[in-house]
Amino acid sequence: MSTLDVLSDPPRAVRSRFELAALRLADRWLRTGHLEVAAEDLLALREYFAGEGLTLEPQPGLVEKLGGDGGEPIEMTREDALLLAFRRLASAEARRREAILALTVAAG
């Protein structure tokens, strides 16, 4: 079993409120069996996407428009936007861990 050394490999800094709220949101989803995006969660989602170079804009109804990245804007529900943010956050963390592993293996 390996040991995590936070002095030589400190955790990356939290960049958005969504990153702090993600565990709470995922826990609520697992406990209740459905996704629910509250107003404060939506603000945190918008902040997270802005930090990723994307915009999440409200549309009529309970729909949001996600744009940026040079592509065509996509309309999606708030719940779909939350799932996308979960995926992007998990993917970024997986890439970070792979890089750490590669450095550890290279160091021998």
Image (cartoon, helix red, strand yellow):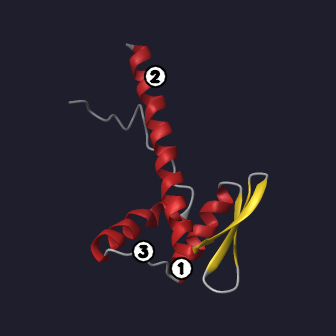
Cα distance, mark 3 to mark 1?
A: 14 Å
Tell me which corner region of the image, top left, top right, bottom left or bottom right, holds residue 108. Answer: top left
Q: Name the residue under label 3.
A: 35
Q: Which mark is nearer the camera, 3 or 2?
A: 3
> Foreground: 20 or 83?
83
Residue 34 location in percent, x, y? 37, 75
Circle 1 SS class:
helix
Circle 3 SS class:
loop
Residue 31 location in percent, x, y? 28, 73
> Foreground: 81 or 102?
81
Q: Which residue is drawn at 50% across and 46% down?
A: 91
Q: Which residue lies furthest to the left in this view?
A: 1
Q: Mark 2 points at which residue?
A: 103
Q: Which mark is residue 17?
A: none
Is 77 on the left-hand or right-hand side of 37?
A: right
> Foreground: 52 or 62?
62
